[in-house]
Image: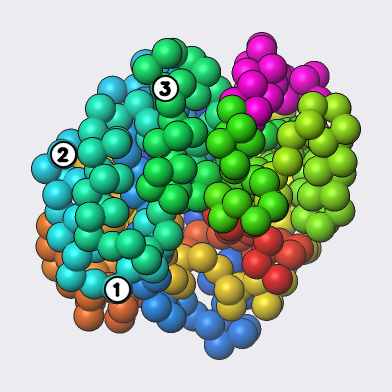
């Protein structure tokens, strides 16, 4: 397999990735597997989750980031686009608002947005996907744990491993130590503590070209190691399979692991996981307001197939419920083994 740059120079990065993801794996396609289950075209079951990307700016540059986020990224959601999101939340039954990035906290209107969401609904869950190190990156973020607590935010944070060596290798030197300090600050206000009502979940994704192990077993390991070594507690661990897009796809191809990894995903295809893929209950909102079936399709710039409802300002529930979900070979990542979603294993 050629490197991404060698595929076709005039194509954009996204076009090159899609060209790769249009290729069958040993003659097999994700669409073909869905057809065998009578699941194609894949359709939504409901729209319970609104996942909102608040921008690609981040204080970290993680090796496997599918958003390709970093300090140099300037894409940021405007307050105007947030107002359109608030209108959808106000008029429709959205059970979960999932704020992601980059580091969503770096958006200058981040706190305002959460306050406005809470003014509309006291019952919807608000998730913030916090990379932990942002909490200790600058004094202006030190009070984030208290802010999260005030607004009953569910904090979901990536921690590649319970040791510094593996975590820093994937996310940058010193990240593990900073993450531990941030976790201590979250624990101090009650996050992850039994009966506090403040949810702190961690996310694990493999650092190499392999699938995650058992979510239950890894959770037990993480809980023991973090408690024994640092006194850290948390609620649950989510295992997420790395999908072959963006930086991770580039890694797979440059290291010669792409074909082997895709074969692993295909051979681990789980029909039950296919029925429960997160795109069937989620709409992903890009930093610029465009709508996607999931966060991964967003990074591939594959807008929803609802022709008159491709932007948050044009939200049309009927069209979005009736749309066909766009699938390509990267979708095998969500259906391998126990399944994978932004909430961890699906089966």
Q: Which residue is mark 3?
A: 141
Query: Residue 97's image quarter?
Result: bottom left
Pair 1/3: label in front: 3
Q: Is residue 178 on the magenta stretch? A: yes
Where is the C terminus found, in terms of image quarters?
bottom right
Where disc 1 sits, the SS reads loop
Q: Position of residue 101 (x, y in %)?
A: 40, 37
Q: Which residue is mark 2?
A: 79
Identify the disc placed on residue 93.
1
Name the residue nearer the viewer: 85 or 271: 85
Q: Residues within 10 Å of mark 2 (few under 14, many from 20)?
A: some
Give the residue drawn at x 65%, y 56%.
Answer: 195
Q: Position of residue 124 (x, y in %)?
A: 37, 64
Q: Is residue 12 above or below residue 90?
A: above
Residue 88, can we see it?
no
Q: Position of residue 40 (x, y in %)?
A: 49, 80
Q: Give whichever of discs 2 and 3 has the lower sequence position.
A: 2
23 relative to 170 in the view: left or right? left
Name the residue nearer the viewer: 7 or 65: 65
Pair 2/3: label in front: 3
Calculate the distance from the C-alpha at mark 2 to the C-alpha at mark 1.
22 Å
Query: Residue 141's image quarter?
Result: top left
Q: Give whichever of discs 1 and 3 has the lower sequence position.
A: 1
Give the residue drawn at x 28%, y 23%.
Answer: 74
Q: Which residues are magenta?
A: 163-184
Identify the coloring. Answer: rainbow
Where disc 3 sits, the SS reads helix
Q: Is residue 295 above or below residue 45?
A: above
Q: Residue furthest bottom?
A: 38
Q: Is residue 338 above or below residue 37?
A: above
244 relative to 160 in the view: left or right? left
């Amino acid at each position: 397999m050629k490197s991404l740059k060698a595929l076709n120079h005039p194509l954009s990065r996204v076009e090159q990735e899609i060209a790769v993801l249009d290729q069958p794996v040993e003659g097999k396609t994700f669409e073909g597997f869905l057809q065998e289950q009578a699941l194609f075209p894949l359709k939504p079951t409901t729209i319970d989750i609104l996942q909102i990307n608040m921008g690609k700016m981040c204080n970290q540059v993680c090796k496997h980031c599918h958003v390709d986020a970093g300090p140099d990224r300037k894409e940021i959601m405007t307050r105007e686009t947030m107002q359109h999101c608030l209108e959808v939340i106000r008029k429709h039954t959205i059970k979960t608002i999932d704020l992601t990035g980059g580091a969503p906290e770096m958006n200058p209107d981040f706190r305002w947005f959460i306050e406005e969401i809470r003014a509309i609904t006291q019952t919807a869950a608000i998730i913030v996907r916090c990379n932990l190190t942002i909490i200790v990156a600058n004094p202006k973020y030190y009070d984030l744990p208290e802010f999260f607590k005030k607004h009953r935010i569910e904090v979901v944070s990536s921690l590649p491993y319970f040791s510094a060596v593996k975590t820093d290798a994937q996310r940058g030197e010193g990240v593990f130590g900073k993450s531990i300090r941030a976790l201590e600050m979250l624990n101090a206000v009650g996050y992850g503590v039994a009966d506090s009502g403040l949810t702190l979940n961690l996310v694990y994704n493999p650092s190499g070209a392999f699938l995650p192990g058992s979510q239950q077993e890894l959770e037990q390991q993480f809980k023991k190691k973090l408690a024994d070594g640092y006194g850290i507690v948390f609620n649950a661990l989510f295992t997420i399979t790395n999908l072959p897009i963006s930086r991770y796809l580039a890694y797979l191809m440059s290291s010669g692991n792409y074909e082997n990894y895709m074969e692993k995903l295909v051979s681990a295809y789980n029909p039950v996981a296919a029925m429960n893929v997160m795109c069937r209950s989620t709409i992903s909102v890009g930093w610029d307001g465009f709508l996607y079936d999931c966060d991964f399709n967003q990074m591939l710039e594959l807008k929803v197939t609802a022709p008159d409802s491709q932007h948050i300002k044009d939200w049309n529930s009927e069209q979005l419920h009736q749309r066909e979900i766009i699938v390509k070979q990267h979708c095998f990542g969500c259906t391998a083994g126990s399944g994978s979603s932004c909430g961890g294993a699906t089966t």
